[in-house]
Structure formats: C-alpha cells, structure tokens
Amino acid sequence: MKIYGQSLREIFDKLPWTYKIVVTVSCFFILFVMIYAPSVLLSPIKKAKKDIVKNLSISGASKKVEGIFDPSISYDRKSRKVWMAYTVKDKLRSQSGGMLVHVRLASSLIEKNCKSWVQVNGGFEGKSDDILGANGQTVFRSGTWRVETPTLVHDPEDKGREWKLYAYKYFWDNDPTHALQLARRYGMIVYKYATDPAESWSTEQWLFSPAYGQLPPPYGQMAMIHLNDLNESLKNVEVYSRPSVIIRDGMLVMTLSAFTKGTSPDRIIMIVSGDHGKSWKYIGTPLRVSDLEGIEPYTRLSGASLIEQDGVVYLAAVLGDAQQHGKGTFIFSFDDFKKGHLKRDPKTGVPSVLRHVPLYKPESVPIGGGFAAYSDVCPFGLLTSEQIPGTEKFRLLKTYENPAL
C-alpha cells in the first residue's frame, strides 16, 4: 500500500523521532484493544457479577442477631424514601428458652441509591407466650410466637392505611415432639397498616387462616378470612405462609405458599383485592411442585414472591432438592398475569424459567437461599437472602442482577 507514491515504511522513516514514538505506542495500544476487548466481551457475565456481590448492612440493628433474611422492598416517590421489611433471627432466647424470630423495618433514600439503611420502629415482635385450651383459661402449651417472611406494600389511594405490612405468624412449642404439629395448627397471616412507616402502626390483626376450625378455640374467631373458602381447589390446604404483595392497577395482588401434608409448599397461589385488602378473591395457582418434574434436577418448591421491573411483574421462586432447600432465585414471567398463568413451553406445558440467579456461595448448606426482593429505584438489582456457609446465620446480598436480562 502506497500513499502519494510512498510506502508506509518510507513515510515512517521520514517522521521525527518524537512522532515515531507516538505512532509506535498507538499501534501497540490498538493491538492490545483488539486482543483484550473480545476477551472481556466474551467472558462469562456471571463471573463478573459475582465479583461485585456485596452484603447489605443495616445500621441501628441489634448486634444480638443471628441473621437477617426474606427481604421485601417498597418505596414512596413523594417522600423519596425506600422501605424494607425483613426477618430477624435473634441471638437472645425467649423467657421460655425458645428462639425469637421478628419482622423488622429499615429505610433508605432514593437519592443515595439505597446505599445506607437504618432500622426504624415497627414490624412484628416474636415473644414468649402460653396458648390456652378451649375454655380460654387453662394453659395448653408454652412456647414462642414467631413472625417471619414479611411483605410490605405502598397503597397510596387507601387514605390512612397507605402502608400495609403482612407476615406469617406461628406458635412454636418448647417441646420439639409437638412443635411442628402445633405450628401447622396455630399459624396465620397477620397484618398491620400505617400512614407513615416511620410513625405508629396499627395493632396486629390475624387476617388469614386456612379454614374455620383450623385455629383451635378460643383462637378460631380471631382470623378474619378463611382462604380455603375462596375456591374449591384450596380445600386440602393446611397452612399458608410467605405472603408477597404488589399493587397493580389499584389492585392488591398477593401470592402465598400453600402447604398440604409436607414440610415444603405444594403450590403457590395468587389472590387479589380490589378494595384495599378488605376482601379477597382467588385468581389461580401459578406454580405447583408437580411442575418441577419438567425443571430438572429440582424437586423441591420452597416458596416464591412477586417482583416488578420496569412495569413488568415476575414470579421469583426458590427451588431446591433433598440436599438443599434453596439453590438460588428462579425467575418466571407471566403469560396472563390477571389469571395467574405463567409462560409455559407450548409442547410440554412446563413453566419456562426466564433466568436463574444462583447462590453466591453454593456450598452444601442445608437451607441455601434465594428469596429475593427488587426495586427499580435501587441500583443493586435483586436483593437476596442466603445462608452463610458453616453457620445457621443468614445475610442479605446485593447481587447486581436484574430479574429480566
């Protein structure tokens, strides 16, 4: 190749020595970019993401805590604040010696990109208690009320009740031989509301139980709604847990983990309220444990939550197996959200996994993790909870992964 009758070599030889240095360095730089850029672009994204995963810490929280998990995030653009509800396992034991599990609240600022979180008053308190027999006087069992798996939603049109907090509450007997059985009988979805999360909250209400008579007397009349009455397909459900709520077109939409006989959910159901939570209707069942037969190698459905990104709602489920309850976050998209229908393979009918965000530390911890929260205003992407290897503690992780790619 010649330019004005001269080769590139001849032109280079005539350049001043300072220009020769510039040209040589530039050539080496271009060569470096040509080699390095493709290696960066083609390297696995998961590795790059994993390198920046960080713990989310909450200031003002008690140091006597064994772990925080099960986050739920909501925000109010008017106040420019982001609010989070989460479960806390306390190092302190109750008066009866049982483990204390609470629901706490924290806040952050949108302008600060949700970088720092401060614990505030509110939530649900776990406590020692005695449950009474049918006569309302005789002590039947001694133990601890535990409250966990909260969900927080902002409902601005419901004046005086703009903020709603739901959670799963159950009684844990001091005698381990009875504990699980009693937890299934004495379990319900509880509810509180507030105008401002930083101010006073309402008294706790026992909102949902499975069926009339599920809560033994004298507690049975305290549950306001019996979910099994909403649809014939729910008649065999014995426990509802892990509420997750979003607001969509002025409607409150909630998913719940529904248990029949086992220690893990049989299905995820969806209900909706058009009157700010006063009454509820059954929509459908987006996901069942039987669906996992087509999503190998997973055999356990541990639960799910609703998350929304850029106006699109997804189901964030946690799947696992006999060795590990949760192997990360599995994102499913909806084919018909109003009917609770997930997108499924047209040939097999199996729900299509949009993406899988694996555990940050996938060591063989028995619980694992993956329960997630997300908000468009927080740049850390999915916020997940995960068991710390070698311990029974849990932590919150900023994954910098979005629900949808």
Image (spheres, rainbow, N blue to C red):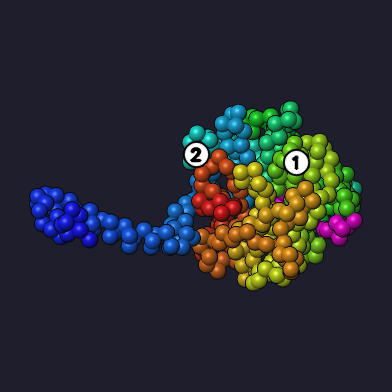
Quadrant housing residue 279: top right
Crowding near pointer 1: few (<14 within 10 Å), some, many (20+)?
Answer: many
Please name the residue shown 59% across and 61% down the image: 356
Which amino acid type is marked by label 2? Asn
Under circle 2, the secondary element is loop
* Percent coordinates x, y for residue 129 in the rendering: 74, 48
* The residue stretch that appears in magenta: 232-243
Quarter in which the C terminus is drawn? bottom right
The circle drawn on residue 113 is 2
Kindly tell me whether residue 342 is visible in this rendering.
yes
Left or right: 343, with 17 as reference point: right
Instruction: Say what amino acid the circle numbered 1 marks.
Output: Leu
Q: Is residue 287 left or right of residue 65?
A: right
Q: CA distance from mark 2 to mark 1?
A: 27 Å
Q: Is residue 316 magenta?
A: no
Residue 236 shown in magenta: yes
Q: Residue at x 74, y 38 (%)?
A: 249
Identify the mark at residue 252; answer none if there is no mark: 1
Residue 289 horizontal/vertical position (percent): 74, 65
Vertically, is 215 above or below 75? below
Residue at the spot x=79%, y=44% of the render? Answer: 272
Q: Position of residue 122 (x, y in %)?
A: 64, 37
Q: Position of residue 95 (x, y in %)?
A: 66, 49
Between 350 and 30, the one lying in front of the other is: 30
Q: Residue at x 53, y 35 (%)?
A: 110
